[in-house]
């Protein structure tokens, strides 16, 4: 297993290098430059040149690349031009917020998807199955910003059940640590519900179809014939096997969830990585874009590695093969 | 499969359990975590789309929120331009300086500082702060992007702790504005960091912040909120009139409106005209509007043969139905323009009238210039070449993106083919600065000096905003004369003449002057946004709950 993990990490590092190199050249070749942020009618060409020299943007792109690569190998991801801070610090400050939002979203997505998928499968063909399938199709088709708009209008503006935006209340720093945690949880509820519900439609269908498929297998028939209770057959024998494709999907879902969280972060003013990257791209803030690309790459690698490990844990055939 | 399910007893059916689990869990999520902050302090809350990027003007990009905070909340200028800019040349009220005077030759400008102004840490504000601020503004390592405005200031001399003299290399109209540009910074606190290290230590200034304006920065959670609190050492009696102002950073338009409508925010500084009706229909909200010193236009690249003739540019202008644009995109909150100066400015030429929407006359002019539809495809052509060009704009502005198909449709009616493209502003600046485009929809803003040389002077083709490469020596001469005229009121005939020439030459088709709309809760008083800033008189805002 260890060899398998190390081999995967090695190939992922090479892939990451190519992704970063491509991104470096693509963003530098894209029209526009970061120093336009400082533009104004008084700014002379000499002053622009001074700024270019200050940020090393006057050198040829290949020279910039070599110097950037050297710095990255030393752990220096450069300095954000728009935020005037180290790019790595910008992302690390926000990463925990994004991770919190994404994890909450993933949890809701899978809990809701699992429960509704199970319900639909055990009641296949009934009215409840039909309703769940319609709702899951609706959630799957509805753009996330539409779901967010409707939820904000109904749950936050009219019923005032949740805060409309931000991660903490004004004045929350005066509360006890426990109350502060509850305050964050309260702010987290609506965006994570939206993130989770917007994507749970696919999980519902995965679980329902997987379970219906497994329930028709010979070993389930055998288990029934042995007189095991239906709930034991369902929970212990059927569900574990039906979840394997879902676990594989989980690794791929992580980067997709990160991009989905971008919209939610913007709509709810959630101070995460997505918002920083969104601003960095529009301002051609090269160091932040490159550092965030690396971060996304690492997350994709870790996500798919985690999916493989979980798969191996769930499926003895895979475990034995590795 | 169904057979399997039907064999299970109802007692062991997991469905009710699962459903109950989902409901209980959802209820818990909704209810838990609702914390109550006891006796929350009454605060003005502003839903604002952008965060501040620092607290040092010299190392951060200039944005409306940065300027609003720097100039009206945290720091003082020597003098403050007043909101009477519509009626005549800018007038200035004393701020840090209680008076100023020019020498007879206008090469020296002396400011007499107030003796009662102190920094928020109790240290007196002196002439040394003024001189040191100037040194920072022009220091090569600081690379302040506005440093050019100080190029004709040769020295700033400290006469005594409350007297400072600006020395100029020449006399010109905007001397006071140039001397006054930028806020006065705290030498005793910020000179601890050498100028050479400023660019790499932006957060240092926030950590060592002292102010002399009406508000201190109580806290700043990036991308969340920043909070202003009354500066107890501020020199004006009874000001500021509110204790605490919270800026909730809310990039999404709908979320900002939701905050305002639910009573969780008191103000949105700029709203879209399409949302104005919603604000007007809310009994607790009020809609304020003002005309900014901006002009919206289509700039024609006159270096391209297609737009080289001014009569062709006039024809294209008459082919654009601006009334329809105003009704469709601005819901009546704008009016047709014919000048870079908005109609409420004293420099505006009231005698001129906008080019009318006259497709008949436009067709006639095009035909007179040999542009006729010879092949019956609906597009005029000449010498086998169709009258076809590309119109570009930046994608961040939905109004400008929506303008593309409208102008395309209008010009199609007179037999002109328009191809459209929108791109990010940062990407758009490349073709604009290299003059590699046919026509562009953009907006520009006038500064205090109302200097139009950045836009229409031939010197502004390289490095300025004269993207369409317009060049008319007579226009250059008139612009130079307006800039050199020391008594700006005497320059009014020159401004009138300039507008007549621009109207005739049509280097740009001025589209409309748009009103900027602000939404305010009725329990927030004295909000008076104007072209200088939406936060112009923030120190005099008053919240009803505060008494």
Image: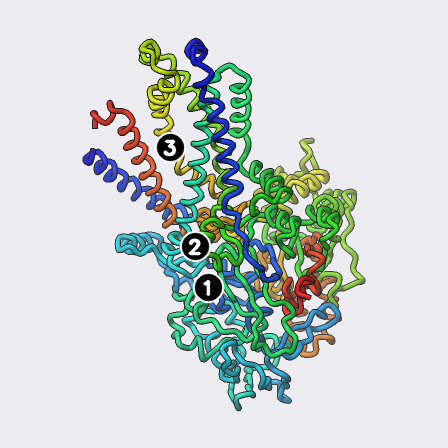
Residue B347 at what x, y percent from top left? 73, 67
Q: Please tell me whether mark 2 or mark 3 is closer to you in this view.
A: 2
Give whichever of B74, A193 is nearer the camera: A193
What is the CA distance from the residue labelled 2 to the residue labelled 3? 32 Å
Q: Quadrant of residue B525?
A: bottom right
Q: Quadrant of residue B344?
A: bottom right
Q: Of label 3 and label 1, which has the lower sequence position?
A: 1
From the image, which quarter does the N terminus of chain B lie in?
A: top left
What is the CA distance from the residue labelled 2 to the residue labelled 1? 48 Å
Q: Which residue is mark 3?
A: A250
Q: Quadrant of residue B171?
A: bottom right
Give whichever of A225, A298 is nearer the camera: A225
Q: Find numbered disc 1 in the image and state the secondary structure of the residue it sits on.
A: helix
Q: Find numbered disc 2 in the image and state the secondary structure of the residue it sits on.
A: helix
In the image, farthest residue toward the right: B351
Q: Which residue is mark 1?
A: A48
| Label ID, residue A37 | none
Residue A23 at what x, y percent from top left? 37, 45
Q: Are marks 3 and 1 in contact (CB under 8 Å)?
A: no
Q: Please tell me whether mark 3 or mark 1 is closer to you in this view.
A: 3
């Amino acid at each position: 297993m260890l060899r398998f993990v190390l081999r995967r990490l090695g190939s992922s590092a090479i892939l990451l290098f190519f992704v970063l190199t491509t991104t470096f050249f693509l963003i530098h070749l894209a029209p526009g430059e970061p120093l336009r942020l400082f533009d104004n009618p008084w700014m002379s060409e000499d002053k622009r040149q001074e700024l270019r020299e200050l940020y090393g943007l006057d050198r040829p792109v290949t020279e910039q690349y070599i110097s950037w690569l050297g710095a990255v190998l030393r752990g220096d991801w450069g300095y954000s031009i728009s935020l005037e801070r180290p790019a790595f610090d910008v992302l690390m400050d926000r990463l925990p917020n994004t991770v919190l939002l994404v994890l909450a979203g993933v949890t809701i997505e899978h809990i809701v998807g699992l429960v509704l998928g199970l319900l639909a499968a055990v009641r296949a063909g009934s009215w409840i199955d039909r309703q769940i399938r319609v709702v899951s199709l609706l959630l799957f088709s509805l753009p996330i910003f539409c779901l967010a708009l409707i939820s904000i209008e109904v749950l936050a503006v009219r019923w005032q059940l949740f805060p409309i935006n931000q991660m903490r209340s004004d004045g929350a720093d005066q509360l006890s640590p426990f109350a502060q945690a509850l305050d964050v949880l309260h702010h987290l509820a609506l965006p994570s519900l939206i993130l989770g519900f917007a994507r749970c439609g696919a999980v519902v269908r995965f679980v329902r179809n997987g379970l219906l498929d497994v329930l028709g297998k010979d070993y389930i028939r055998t288990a029934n014939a042995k007189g095991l209770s239906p709930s034991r057959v369902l929970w212990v024998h059927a569900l574990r096997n039906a979840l394997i494709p879902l676990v594989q999907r989980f690794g791929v879902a992580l980067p997709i969830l990160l991009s989905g969280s971008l919209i939610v972060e913007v709509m709810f003013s959630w101070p995460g990585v997505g918002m920083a990257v969104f601003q960095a791209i529009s301002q051609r803030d090269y160091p932040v874009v490159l550092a965030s690309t690396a971060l996304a790459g690492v997350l994709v690698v870790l996500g798919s590695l985690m999916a493989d490990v979980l798969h191996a844990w769930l499926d003895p055939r895979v475990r034995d093969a590795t | 499969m169904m057979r399997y399910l039907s064999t299970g007893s109802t007692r062991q059916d997991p469905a009710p359990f699962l459903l109950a689990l989902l409901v209980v869990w959802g209820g818990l999520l909704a209810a838990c975590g609702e914390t109550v902050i006891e006796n929350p302090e009454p605060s003005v809350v502003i839903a604002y789309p952008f965060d501040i990027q620092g607290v040092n003007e010299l190392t951060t990009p200039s944005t409306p929120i940065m300027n609003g905070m720097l100039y009206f909340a945290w720091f003082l200028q020597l003098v403050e331009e007043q909101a009477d800019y519509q009626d005549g040349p800018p007038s200035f009220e004393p701020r840090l300086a209680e008076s100023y005077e020019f020498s007879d030759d206008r090469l020296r400008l002396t400011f007499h500082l107030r003796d009662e102004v102190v920094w928020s840490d109790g240290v007196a504000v002196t002439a040394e702060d003024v001189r040191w601020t100037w040194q920072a503004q022009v220091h090569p390592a600081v690379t302040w992007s506005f440093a050019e405005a100080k190029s004709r200031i040769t020295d700033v001399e400290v006469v005594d702790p409350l007297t400072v003299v600006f020395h100029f290399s020449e006399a010109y109209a905007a001397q006071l504005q140039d001397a006054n540009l930028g806020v006065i910074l705290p030498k005793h606190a910020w000179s601890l960091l050498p100028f050479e290290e400023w660019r790499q230590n932006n957060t240092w200034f926030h950590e060592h912040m002292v102010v002399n304006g009406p508000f201190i920065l109580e806290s700043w959670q990036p991308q969340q909120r920043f909070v202003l609190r009354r500066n107890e050492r501020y020199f004006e009696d009874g000001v500021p009139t509110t204790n605490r102002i919270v800026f909730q950073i809310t990039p999404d338009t709908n979320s900002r409106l939701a905050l305002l409508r639910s009573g969780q925010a008191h103000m949105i500084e700029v709203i879209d005209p399409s949302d104005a009706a919603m604000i007007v229909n809310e009994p607790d909200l009020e809609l304020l509007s003002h005309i900014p010193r901006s002009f919206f236009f289509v700039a024609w690249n006159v270096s391209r043969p297609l737009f080289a003739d001014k009569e062709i540019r006039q024809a294209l202008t008459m082919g654009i139905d601006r009334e329809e644009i105003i009704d469709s995109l601005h819901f009546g909150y704008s009016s047709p323009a014919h000048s870079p100066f908005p109609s409420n400015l004293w420099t505006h030429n009231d005698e001129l009238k906008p080019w009318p929407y006259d497709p008949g006359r436009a067709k006639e002019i095009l035909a007179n210039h040999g542009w006729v539809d010879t092949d019956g495809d609906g597009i005029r052509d000449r010498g086998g070449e169709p009258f076809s060009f590309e119109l570009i704009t930046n994608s961040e502005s939905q109004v400008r993106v929506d303008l593309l198909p409208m102008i395309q449709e209008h010009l199609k009616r007179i037999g002109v083919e328009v191809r459209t493209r929108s791109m990010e502003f940062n990407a758009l600046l490349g073709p604009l600065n290299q003059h590699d485009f046919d026509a562009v929809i953009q907006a520009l803003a006038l500064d205090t000096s109302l200097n139009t040389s950045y836009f229409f002077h031939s010197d502004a083709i390289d490095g300025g905003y004269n993207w369409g490469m317009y060049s008319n020596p007579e226009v250059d001469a008139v612009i130079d004369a307006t800039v050199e005229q020391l008594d700006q009121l005497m320059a009014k005939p020159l401004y009138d003449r300039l507008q007549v020439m621009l109207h005739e030459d049509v280097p740009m088709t001025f589209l409309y002057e748009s009103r900027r709309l602000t939404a305010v809760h009725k329990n927030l008083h004295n909000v008076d946004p104007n072209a200088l800033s939406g936060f112009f008189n923030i120190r005099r805002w008053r919240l009803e709950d505060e008494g």
